[in-house]
Image: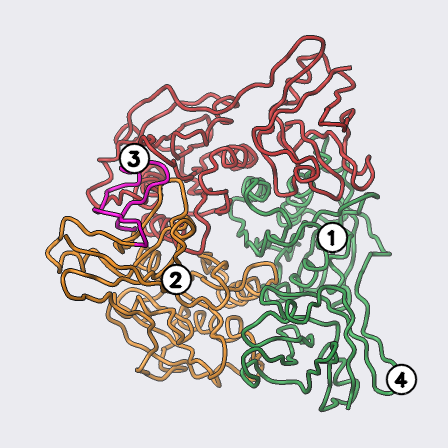
Chain colours: A red, B green, C orange
Amino acid sequence: VNTFFTGIVTLLTDFGTADGYVGAMKGVLLSEIPEVQIVDISHEIAPYSYRQAAYSLLNYAFNFPSGTVHVVVVDPGVGSKRKGLILKTANHLFIGPDNGVFSHIYRSVSYQAFQIKEQEFGSEVSATFHGRDIFAPAAARLIKGEDIENFCDPVSDLYSFYEAYQKMAEGKLILKVLHVDHFGNLITNFTYGDWLALGQPETLCAKIADIQIERIKKTFSEVGSGQYALLWDSQDFLQIAENSGRASDSLAMGEDDSIEFIIK
Amino acid sequence: VNTFFTGIVTLLTDFGTADGYVGAMKGVLLSEIPEVQIVDISHEIAPYSYRQAAYSLLNYAFNFPSGTVHVVVVDPGVGSKRKGLILKTANHLFIGPDNGVFSHIYRSVSYQAFQIKEQEFGSEVSATFHGRDIFAPAAARLIKGEDIENFCDPVSDLYSFYEAYQKMAEGKLILKVLHVDHFGNLITNFTYGDWLALGQPETLCAKIADIQIERIKKTFSEVGSGQYALLWDSQDFLQIAENSGRASDSLAMGEDDSIEFIIK
Amino acid sequence: VNTFFTGIVTLLTDFGTADGYVGAMKGVLLSEIPEVQIVDISHEIAPYSYRQAAYSLLNYAFNFPSGTVHVVVVDPGVGSKRKGLILKTANHLFIGPDNGVFSHIYRSVSYQAFQIKEQEFGSEVSATFHGRDIFAPAAARLIKGEDIENFCDPVSDLYSFYEAYQKMAEGKLILKVLHVDHFGNLITNFTYGDWLALGQPETLCAKIADIQIERIKKTFSEVGSGQYALLWDSQDFLQIAENSGRASDSLAMGEDDSIEFIIK
C-alpha cells in the first residue's frame, strides 16, 4: 500500500523560468496526475550550485506534510555521468542527482537510497533533459503507487560535500562558510548541536582580519546598523549577519571560505 | 462562524526563493491545511523595501475573492522591534509587519487592526524567522476558524509612509515618486481622484530639468519611441512612462524623488 | 459542450513579479473560477521579448493536459496596436498578443485563430493592462464554457518572426540563433527534421571565427570542460553548448545572429 498519496511535489531547480524548462516538468506532472499539487520552491539556484540547493532543501523539506515528494534538479555538470537518486526517509521522498544536493539530508535523517534505472524511462529520453523525462515521471510513478524497486536499484556510496568544522588546539575552531543567503548572511558549518557538545561556551569570537565578532545574539536588533552579529539561523547553523548590510560584501567572504573562531 | 473559508493564501516577500525560506512557509501552511491554495505573488521585493511591497499589494489585493488571506513578509529592518499586524477588512485579511507595507491599504478601505501576541506561538520561535513561525501559522489558525482575538490584541497608531501630493501657489503641484516598476515607469502619489478634485485640468505638465511632459494620454502608443507620456496606471496613479524605454533611467529619477507639475 | 474543462491556466509574462501585476491576474482568475489551477511558467521573460516567449512556450505547451489554457502576456511594445488573439488547437487554447509570441506554434500544429473584440470586456478596461482586464477574463469565460465566437472574430494574417535556415551552395548552411537560454546555450533554427531532410549528414561543422565545432553529440559529457558541443535541445533544435561555460559569452553570439555551418 502506498503511503505517499498526498500528491504534493516540490520543485527546486537551477533552470530559471524563462526558457520554459520548468513549465515542461509541470506539464508532465499534471498530465500524469491531474490532481497533483505542484509547489515551486525555487528555480533561481545559481547554475550548477549543488551546495546552494543542498542548503535550501534542508530549510524546507521537513516542514512539508508526510508523503511529499521533493524533486531537485541541479545540473550535474561536467564529466562523468551522475546517478539519478531516490531517497526514502520516514516521511518524504527525495528525487535528484547524486552530486551533493542531498548532503544535508544524509546527516539529518535516516534513509534508504536507490538509483534510478534510466532505461526504464523509455526510448524518448533526451540526453539533456533529465528533469522532464526522468525525474518528473519518476515522481508521478511513485505517487500513483508504483513500487520503487520497479525502476530503481538500491545504492550506496553517495556523494556528500559536507565537512564538519575543525577543532584545533587552544580553543581555536575553523569553520567554513556553507552558504551565503539572499541577504548576504554567512551561514557556517557550526550547528547549535556542535555548540552544546562543546559545553555551550558563552563567548565565541570570530576573527576576520581586524574585525572581531563576539557572543551569540538572539536578534539583529541587539547590534547597531552596520554592525555584525553571530546568530543561529533558522536551521540552527551559526551565521554572521550584518544589521542593515550584507556581511558577505563588507567582509569579502563567500562560499567555502574558512573563518577562525576562538572560544573564550 | 468563520467567513474566511476560501483557503486562499497569497505570499509577498523580500526573501528571494533560492534559500528555501519561502519553501518553509509553504510547508508549514500545507502541513496545517492540506487543501490550502497558496498563491505566489512575489518573492523579489527588493530587500527591506516596504514601499515596493505596499505598492504591489494594492495592485492585487482587491482582485482576490472574498476570504483571501494576504501575507506580506518584508524584513522590518533595523532597530526597534516592529509589531506583527493583522488587518481585517470587509472581504480580506492581511498579515504582516507594522513597517509601512499596509500604507496604501489604510487609505483605501476601512479596517480593524490587531497586533499578534508572539508568545501565543510557542517556545520554538526563531528570532529571525517570523514568516515561518508566526505569520504562516497565524494565517492557518484564522483559516481553520480560530477567533482573531485568541492570539491578537486590538491596536492603533500604525505606521504609514504615504504622503499626499502638495499643492503650491499658482497652479504648481509637487508630486513624489511612489514606486518605480519593472518597466522603469515612474508612479506618482497623484491619483485620478486627486485629478477629479482639481476639476479635471486638461493639461498637466511635468517639468524635469529641461524636459516638459504634457497632457495625460490613454496609451503609450500616442507618443513616439523614446518619448514620454503621462498615463493613469492600473491603480489610477499618475505615472510617467517612456515608450520603448525606461523613464526612471533616462530621467534619472527614483523612489521618493519630487517632481514639479504645472496646471495649465 | 465545452471540452476545455480541466481548469488549468498557465501564465507566461514579461511583468516580473514585484509590482503585483501578475498577482492581479491571478486574483481575477480565482475570483471568476475558484477551482482554477494557475500554473506559473515564468514572469521573467525579458521585457518585450516576444522571441524568448515564443521559444519558451514551445518548450512546455504540449506537455500540458488536453484542455489547458495557455496565457502569454508580453508587452506588445511600440506603435500600432496589436490584436489580442486566441488560438484553438486540437488540445489547447492559447491567448496572447499578435506580436510573434505564437510563431513556433503556427509552424508546429494546426489551429484556428480568433481576434478578441476588446469592447466585449466592458468600460473599465485600462489602456495599459490587457493581462488583467482582457486576457485573464477571456480565459475565465472560455473555461466557464462560453463560446469563443461570442467575443472573438475569426482572423488571419498573423505575425510570425520565424525564418527557416538558409541552404547555400556547396554544402553551406546559414543558421540563425533563435534563443539564448539560461545556461548560455545557443539554440538555432535548425531542427532534427531539417537534418533528416538533408539525409542525416554525419558531420555538421559550425564555423565561428577561428573555432570549428564538429559532429552532433548525445551529451555534454562527450566533450571536455570549456569545449563546445553540437546537441539537439529538448525541442529538437540544434544548439551549441559549452561544457561548464556559457557559449553565448565565450563565442560572443546572441539572439538573431547568423552562424555558418558546413556539411562534410
Which residue was labeled with disc 3?
A146
Residues beneath discs 4 and 3 located on the same chain: no
Residue B158, compared with residue A230, is above or below; it is: below
**Nearer the camera: disc 4 or disc 1:** 4
Q: Residue furthest top?
A: A169
**Nearer the camera: disc 2 or disc 1:** 2
Q: Chain of mark 3?
A: A
Which residue was labeled with disc 1?
B86
What's the magenta region? C208-233
Circle 2 residues within 10 Å: few <14, some 14–19, many ≥20: some
Horizontal and vertical percent position of residue A106 = 47, 23
Q: Residue furthest right?
A: B169
What residue type is disc 3 on? Glu
Q: Secondary structure at mark 2?
A: loop
Labels 1 and 3 touching (C-beta < 8 A): no
Residue A153: name its quadrant.
top left
Is residue C234 rendered to the left or right of residue C42? left
What residue type is disc 2 on? Glu
Horizontal and vertical percent position of residue C33 = 48, 65
Q: CA distance from mark 1 to mark 3?
A: 45 Å
Which residue was labeled with disc 2?
C255
Q: CA distance from mark 4 to mark 3?
A: 77 Å
What residue type is disc 4 on? Ala
**Nearer the camera: disc 2 or disc 3:** 2
State the residue at coordinates (77%, 70%).
B176
